[in-house]
Amino acid sequence: MKFVAFVCLGLWWPMVAGAAEPKPITVTVGEEFKVTLQYNATTGYQWQLSKPPDEKLVKLLGSEYKRADSALIGAGGDQIWTFKALAEGNTALALDYVRPWEKGTKPAQSTNLVVVIKARKTKGKAPD
């Protein structure tokens, strides 16, 4: 079973006063989930994890870029991060929108996501 969490942060996001943080992502142990962030590869910016996820709770499976369905030159798209929940607990995913070669520069955007991982429901007989 897969769960998709869409976090749509466009380039306009930093200009919006009081923008709400995304809701927590709730998944079950063993479940894969996706985080989708708007991104424009032609600007040189890309989303990066600002710190590695807690390896006891979450495993990064990969990241891919999906172009927008547009004929416009320089049109943006989405960066899709795929994770797998490994164990019960709560953790955070911190991502920054940066130009990788600009070391020491403040990110254009940042987002922090809370991941709540619940135990798998067991199938079978109820205890006597």
Image (spheres, rainbow, N blue to C red):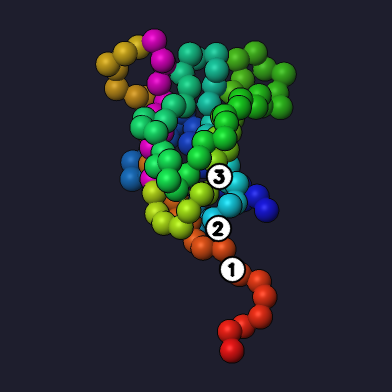
Q: Are marks 1 and 2 in contact (CB under 8 Å)?
A: yes
Please count the marks in the image: 3
Quadrant where the C terminus is found in the figure = bottom right
| Observer-nearest of 103 and 127 | 127
Say the numbered circle drawn on residue 65: none
Helix, strand or loop: magenta stretch? strand
Q: Which residues fall within the magenta stretch? A: 92-101
| x and y percentages locating residue 71 in the rendered image | 72, 18
Going by the numbered disc 2, the residue's amino acid type is: Thr
According to the image, label 3 marks what residue? 84
Q: Which mark is residue 28?
A: 2
Instruction: Decide if residue 96 is on the left or right side of residue 87.
Output: left
Q: Nearer the viewer, residue 75 or 48?
A: 48
Amino acid type at mark 3: Lys
Disc on res. 121: 1
Query: Which residue is situated farthest in the left direction here?
Result: 104
Could you tell which of marks 3 and 2 lies nearer the N-terminus?
2
Reply yes or no: does residue 7 show up in magenta: no
In front here: 61 or 114? 61
Q: Is residue 101 above or below residue 77?
A: above
> Image point 66% across, 80% down: which residue?
125
Q: Is residue 99 in the magenta section?
A: yes
Secondary structure under the numbered disc 2 in the rendered image:
strand
